[in-house]
Image (cartoon, rainbow, N blue to C red):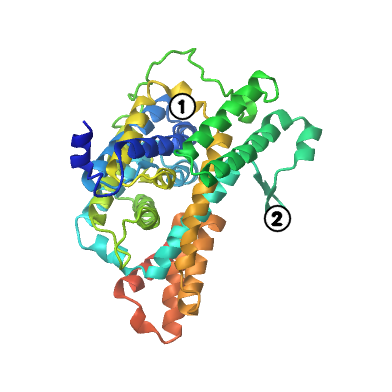
Amino acid sequence: MKEKLDRLFHLKEHGTTVKTEVLAGLTTFVTAAYVLAVNPSVMGATGMDTGAVFTATALVCFLGTLAMALLTNYPFVLVPSMGLNAYFAYTVVLGMGYSWEVALAAIFVEGVVFALISLTSLRDKIFKAIPLNLKYAISTGIGLFITIIGLKNSGLVVSSPATLVSVFSFSGSLADGTFSTAGISVVLFVAGLMITGVLMARNVKGNILVGIIITWVLGIVCELCGIYVPDPAAGYMSLLPDFSNGLAIPSLAPTFMKMDFSRIADLGFIVVAFAFLLTSLFDTVGSLIGLGAKAELLDEDGNMPGVGRAMGAESVATMIAGALGNSATCCSVECAAGIAEGGRTGLMGLTTGMLFLLSMFLSPFFLAIPSFATAPALVIVGSLMASSVLSIDFGDPTESIPAFLCFVGMPFCYSIVEGISLGIISYVAINLLAGNAKKISPMMYVLAVVFIVKYILI
């Protein structure tokens, strides 16, 4: 078996082993499994059946990641986008008034167009057009983006009307009686962060995954001792797996092939599909660059061989998502956790995909892993990815300023695409006005105009 896997995924060539890839895939799954809980909740706001969305989410993750693994042999995982699902639910359906069936049709159309782009030279032109310093900035920005997600999921960083964000108030939680839920969750996150950091410092194999499991077990102990008290109404669930409803898989029937193309000629529909396309395209390109850099998949010019196949896998996954009843997919930034564990091939993705498939049967177990246990992994991985900032040329303002806007834009705008947008527009503008027009490729001009138009129309 090991020999067959080595031939299929070229493990020795990439300096990895079956054990390392499987462990990396397991780590990625644990850090990304929250989509199984979050996505049905977000999509359910439109009136969609949450059980069907859960099953569709697991299937989309499996099929999309399988396509990525077999077509590219890259350690990337495809999941429903946590940004596009919010746009789907709160903007397109609840805001613009389209039915969720019409929104699913827009997702499918976007996937078809994405596939056509993946088959042309446009895919390589877009990837190669982005300057090397911006590519390093994208990797750095994704690291910061992952970090803010981890800090937010942990509860340590909270919203503040006065300062936008603030640190969780322990004294306040003791005063209002929420320490047994919110307070202890933050304490466990901090403990998990320290534990994972020590494991990494001591070079413990599988340190990120071990850190997640130890933090979860500590939470279970706290619940059994009454220190952590579940409060489902406030979003603090029991940390113990609940198998009271058995292992039945929710039916796909309520959302399967429910796409409504009756409004495909409407200008509004076209704008919505374009918004999905633009976000998916640059979410994918940004993630491929950032994650590819950390997995050492980029060549000396910062390009990734076979990027077209990766984008093709993404488009296939998005079309499948529309058909099954889900939002557009993206390359999960959480797979950086698996890359940090040594994942370098499609075997890592295949492992993660299989676990998503199995999650349909064991959803109570996987969904019991709390966000405070996975948040430390996101912060640690964020710190590893942010190291790409050291490769940026800060001696040249025409390179450093756009790079800076790119990597700070991602966490501050809470969007990979917005960070890329700020970087590209500022790069073109600054270099053009500074008399460095020769540095700017024609595709960069096109990308800058496209992003400017996006801000005007969307």
Residue 189, visible in the rendered structure: yes
Residue at point 59% right, 44% down?
Answer: 152
Looking at the image, the residue that sits furthest to the front is 202
Q: Establish if 197 lies above or below 243.
A: below
Relative to residue 329, is residue 2 drawn left or right? left
Which label number is shown at residue 79?
none
Residue 453, visible in the rendered structure: no
Relative to residue 346, is residue 146 drawn left or right? right
Relative to residue 221, is residue 398 drawn left or right? left
Q: Secondary structure at mark 2?
A: loop
Residue at point 29% right, 45% down?
Answer: 345
Looking at the image, the residue that sits furthest to the right is 175
List the residue tagged with mark 1: 366
Local crowd size for mark 1, using a 10 Å CA cut-off: few (<14), some (14–19), many (≥20)? many
Residue 229 placed where, x, y %? Answer: 67, 23
Residue at point 21% right, 63% down?
Answer: 121
- Between 47 and 268, the residue placed more toward the observer is 47
Residue at point 37% right, 27% down?
Answer: 55
Quadrant assignment for the C terminus:
bottom left
Residue 374 placed where, x, y %? Answer: 52, 37
Q: Amino acid at mark 1?
A: Phe
- Between 377 and 108, the residue placed more toward the observer is 377
Q: Amino acid at mark 2?
A: Thr
List the residue tagged with mark 2: 163
